[in-house]
Image (cartoon, helix red, strand yellow):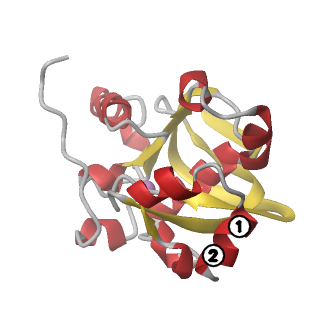
Amino acid sequence: MSEALPRIVQAGDPVLRAVAQLVPEKDLGTPELRALVETMIAVMHAAPGVGLAAPQIGVPLRVIVLEDEEGRMARLSKTQRDERGRVPFGVRAFINPTLRVVGDDQMTYFEGCLSVSGWAALVPRARTVEVTGVDVEGHPQRWEVSGWPARILQHEVDHLLGTLYVDRMISRTFCSSEELSTRWADKSVDEVRKALGG
Ligand code: CO
Protein backbone atom coordinates (compact mmCIF):
# COMPACT_ATOMS: atom_id res chain seq x y z
CA MET A 1 0.00 0.00 0.00
CA SER A 2 1.73 3.17 -1.13
CA GLU A 3 -0.90 5.84 -0.47
CA ALA A 4 -0.03 8.13 2.42
CA LEU A 5 -1.64 7.31 5.73
CA PRO A 6 -3.12 10.08 7.88
CA ARG A 7 -0.85 11.26 10.67
CA ILE A 8 -1.64 10.47 14.28
CA VAL A 9 -2.60 13.71 16.00
CA GLN A 10 -0.79 14.57 19.24
CA ALA A 11 -1.99 15.79 22.64
CA GLY A 12 -2.83 19.47 22.33
CA ASP A 13 -5.14 18.95 19.35
CA PRO A 14 -8.71 19.70 20.56
CA VAL A 15 -10.08 16.69 18.62
CA LEU A 16 -8.53 14.50 21.35
CA ARG A 17 -10.48 16.40 24.01
CA ALA A 18 -13.89 16.38 22.30
CA VAL A 19 -16.64 13.81 22.84
CA ALA A 20 -16.79 11.88 19.56
CA GLN A 21 -20.09 11.59 17.69
CA LEU A 22 -22.13 8.44 17.27
CA VAL A 23 -21.87 6.87 13.81
CA PRO A 24 -25.42 7.24 12.39
CA GLU A 25 -27.20 3.96 11.69
CA LYS A 26 -27.50 4.82 7.99
CA ASP A 27 -23.69 4.86 7.71
CA LEU A 28 -23.23 1.29 8.96
CA GLY A 29 -22.00 -1.05 6.21
CA THR A 30 -21.20 1.80 3.81
CA PRO A 31 -17.98 1.87 1.76
CA GLU A 32 -17.01 5.10 3.59
CA LEU A 33 -17.20 3.47 7.02
CA ARG A 34 -15.37 0.37 5.78
CA ALA A 35 -12.65 2.63 4.33
CA LEU A 36 -12.31 4.49 7.65
CA VAL A 37 -11.86 1.21 9.55
CA GLU A 38 -9.34 -0.09 6.96
CA THR A 39 -7.36 3.14 7.25
CA MET A 40 -7.39 2.96 11.05
CA ILE A 41 -6.12 -0.63 10.98
CA ALA A 42 -3.35 0.38 8.55
CA VAL A 43 -2.34 3.33 10.78
CA MET A 44 -2.36 1.07 13.88
CA HIS A 45 -0.15 -1.48 12.10
CA ALA A 46 2.25 1.15 10.76
CA ALA A 47 2.67 2.89 14.15
CA PRO A 48 2.88 0.08 15.42
CA GLY A 49 0.26 -0.01 18.15
CA VAL A 50 -2.34 -2.28 19.75
CA GLY A 51 -5.28 0.09 19.43
CA LEU A 52 -6.48 3.28 17.75
CA ALA A 53 -9.52 5.53 18.09
CA ALA A 54 -10.86 7.58 15.16
CA PRO A 55 -10.20 10.96 16.87
CA GLN A 56 -6.49 10.05 16.78
CA ILE A 57 -6.55 10.53 13.01
CA GLY A 58 -8.70 13.63 13.37
CA VAL A 59 -12.06 11.92 12.75
CA PRO A 60 -14.52 12.77 15.59
CA LEU A 61 -16.53 9.52 15.37
CA ARG A 62 -17.04 6.65 17.81
CA VAL A 63 -14.91 4.04 16.10
CA ILE A 64 -12.06 2.01 17.64
CA VAL A 65 -9.81 -0.77 16.35
CA LEU A 66 -7.55 -3.05 18.37
CA GLU A 67 -5.31 -6.08 17.95
CA ASP A 68 -2.53 -7.77 19.87
CA GLU A 69 -0.31 -10.33 18.20
CA GLU A 70 1.82 -13.16 19.52
CA GLY A 71 4.91 -11.52 17.97
CA ARG A 72 4.50 -8.37 20.08
CA MET A 73 4.80 -10.34 23.31
CA ALA A 74 7.56 -12.75 22.25
CA ARG A 75 10.13 -11.12 24.57
CA LEU A 76 7.92 -11.54 27.64
CA SER A 77 8.30 -14.43 30.04
CA LYS A 78 5.28 -16.48 31.12
CA THR A 79 5.28 -14.59 34.45
CA GLN A 80 5.40 -11.21 32.73
CA ARG A 81 2.54 -12.20 30.41
CA ASP A 82 0.46 -13.38 33.35
CA GLU A 83 1.21 -10.22 35.37
CA ARG A 84 -0.03 -8.06 32.49
CA GLY A 85 -2.84 -10.43 31.50
CA ARG A 86 -1.48 -10.37 28.00
CA VAL A 87 -3.12 -12.71 25.47
CA PRO A 88 -3.07 -12.43 21.67
CA PHE A 89 -6.28 -11.61 19.79
CA GLY A 90 -7.11 -10.86 16.16
CA VAL A 91 -8.05 -7.45 14.82
CA ARG A 92 -11.41 -6.13 16.01
CA ALA A 93 -13.36 -2.97 15.24
CA PHE A 94 -16.14 -1.56 17.40
CA ILE A 95 -18.54 1.12 16.21
CA ASN A 96 -20.39 3.12 18.89
CA PRO A 97 -18.98 1.04 21.76
CA THR A 98 -20.20 1.33 25.32
CA LEU A 99 -18.09 -0.05 28.13
CA ARG A 100 -19.13 -1.52 31.45
CA VAL A 101 -16.69 -2.43 34.22
CA VAL A 102 -17.21 -5.97 35.54
CA GLY A 103 -16.32 -6.53 39.21
CA ASP A 104 -14.04 -4.48 41.46
CA ASP A 105 -10.61 -5.89 40.60
CA GLN A 106 -8.00 -3.50 39.26
CA MET A 107 -4.65 -3.98 37.56
CA THR A 108 -1.92 -1.34 37.42
CA TYR A 109 0.62 -1.35 34.65
CA PHE A 110 2.54 0.89 32.25
CA GLU A 111 0.51 2.37 29.46
CA GLY A 112 1.39 4.69 26.60
CA CYS A 113 -0.53 6.36 23.79
CA LEU A 114 0.33 7.00 20.15
CA SER A 115 -1.03 10.54 20.69
CA VAL A 116 1.29 11.17 23.67
CA SER A 117 4.33 9.97 21.78
CA GLY A 118 7.50 9.13 23.72
CA TRP A 119 6.00 8.77 27.20
CA ALA A 120 4.38 6.20 29.48
CA ALA A 121 3.06 5.91 33.04
CA LEU A 122 1.46 3.46 35.41
CA VAL A 123 -2.32 3.52 35.01
CA PRO A 124 -4.80 1.62 37.19
CA ARG A 125 -7.53 -0.03 35.12
CA ALA A 126 -10.39 -2.42 35.78
CA ARG A 127 -9.31 -6.03 35.31
CA THR A 128 -12.47 -7.04 33.44
CA VAL A 129 -14.80 -5.08 31.17
CA GLU A 130 -17.71 -5.75 28.87
CA VAL A 131 -17.92 -3.79 25.64
CA THR A 132 -21.02 -3.77 23.48
CA GLY A 133 -21.48 -2.09 20.12
CA VAL A 134 -21.73 -3.03 16.48
CA ASP A 135 -19.21 -4.08 13.85
CA VAL A 136 -18.60 -2.20 10.62
CA GLU A 137 -21.62 -3.88 9.00
CA GLY A 138 -23.87 -3.00 11.92
CA HIS A 139 -24.02 -6.46 13.47
CA PRO A 140 -24.28 -6.34 17.27
CA GLN A 141 -21.19 -7.52 19.12
CA ARG A 142 -20.30 -7.96 22.75
CA TRP A 143 -16.93 -8.78 24.29
CA GLU A 144 -16.27 -9.52 27.94
CA VAL A 145 -12.55 -9.76 28.54
CA SER A 146 -9.89 -9.44 31.26
CA GLY A 147 -6.29 -8.26 31.40
CA TRP A 148 -4.45 -6.51 28.61
CA PRO A 149 -7.31 -6.50 26.07
CA ALA A 150 -9.52 -4.95 28.79
CA ARG A 151 -6.86 -2.25 29.32
CA ILE A 152 -6.75 -1.50 25.59
CA LEU A 153 -10.56 -1.28 25.43
CA GLN A 154 -10.69 1.14 28.39
CA HIS A 155 -7.94 3.27 26.82
CA GLU A 156 -9.62 3.42 23.39
CA VAL A 157 -13.17 4.04 24.67
CA ASP A 158 -11.70 6.85 26.82
CA HIS A 159 -10.45 8.47 23.58
CA LEU A 160 -14.07 8.64 22.36
CA LEU A 161 -14.97 10.61 25.48
CA GLY A 162 -12.06 13.07 25.18
CA THR A 163 -10.02 11.41 27.92
CA LEU A 164 -6.32 10.53 27.69
CA TYR A 165 -4.40 8.14 29.94
CA VAL A 166 -2.57 11.12 31.43
CA ASP A 167 -5.89 12.03 33.10
CA ARG A 168 -5.84 8.67 34.91
CA MET A 169 -2.15 7.94 35.39
CA ILE A 170 -0.22 7.79 38.65
CA SER A 171 1.49 11.02 37.68
CA ARG A 172 4.71 10.47 39.60
CA THR A 173 5.40 7.42 37.43
CA PHE A 174 5.24 9.41 34.16
CA CYS A 175 8.43 8.48 32.32
CA SER A 176 10.05 8.68 28.91
CA SER A 177 9.89 5.62 26.65
CA GLU A 178 13.67 5.40 26.89
CA GLU A 179 13.62 5.27 30.70
CA LEU A 180 10.83 2.72 30.54
CA SER A 181 12.75 0.37 28.26
CA THR A 182 16.18 0.76 29.87
CA ARG A 183 15.24 1.06 33.52
CA TRP A 184 11.78 -0.34 34.26
CA ALA A 185 10.80 -2.89 31.62
CA ASP A 186 11.79 -5.92 33.71
CA LYS A 187 10.93 -4.46 37.14
CA SER A 188 7.78 -5.02 39.12
CA VAL A 189 5.11 -2.36 39.54
CA ASP A 190 5.96 -2.23 43.26
CA GLU A 191 9.62 -1.50 42.51
CA VAL A 192 8.65 1.32 40.13
CA ARG A 193 6.32 2.89 42.67
CA LYS A 194 8.87 2.59 45.44
CA ALA A 195 11.52 4.36 43.33
CA LEU A 196 9.35 7.08 41.80
CA GLY A 197 6.61 7.49 44.38
CA GLY A 198 2.92 7.54 43.79
CO1 CO B 1 -4.24 6.34 22.98
**Whether the residue under disc 2 has CB within 8 Å of ligand 1:** no
Q: For the residue labelled by badge 1, is the local secondary structure a helix, a strand or a loop?
A: helix
- Asked if one can make out residue 125 in the rendered structure from this viewpoint, the answer is no
Determine which of the numbered discs, if any, sits on residue 54 in the image. none
Q: For this view, does 156 lie left or right of residue 194?
A: left
Identify the image quadrant of residue 43. top left
Q: For this view, does 66 lie left or right of residue 58?
A: right
Position of 149 relative to 180 (above/below): above
Tell me the quarter of the image containing the C terminus.
bottom right
Asked whether the beta carbons under mark 2 and mark 1 sit within 8 Å of each other, the answer is yes
Residue farthest top in this picture: 1
Position of 181 relative to 90 (above/below): below
- The residue at 73%/38% (across/down) is 81
- The residue at 48%/72% (across/down) is 174
Q: Amino acid at mark 2?
A: Ala
Q: Which quarter holds ligand 1?
A: bottom left
Pick whichever, 75 or 183, lies toward us.
Answer: 183
- The residue at 27%/66% (across/down) is 15
- Asked if one can make out residue 81 in the rendered structure from this viewpoint, the answer is yes
Q: Answer few, some or many: residues within 10 Å of disc 2's Cα (few below 14, many 20 plus, some between 14 and 19).
A: few
Q: Which residue is mark 2?
A: 195
Identify the image quadrant of residue 190. bottom right
Pick whichever, 70 or 189, lies toward us.
Answer: 189
- Give percent across and percent down for residue 36: 30, 36
Q: How many marks?
A: 2
Q: Amino acid at mark 1?
A: Glu
Q: Which residue is mark 1?
A: 191
Q: For this view, does 73 lie left or right of residue 62?
A: right
Label 2 to label 1, Cα distance in Å? Answer: 6 Å
- Give percent across and percent down for residue 60: 31, 58
Pick whichever, 178 or 174, lies toward us.
Answer: 178
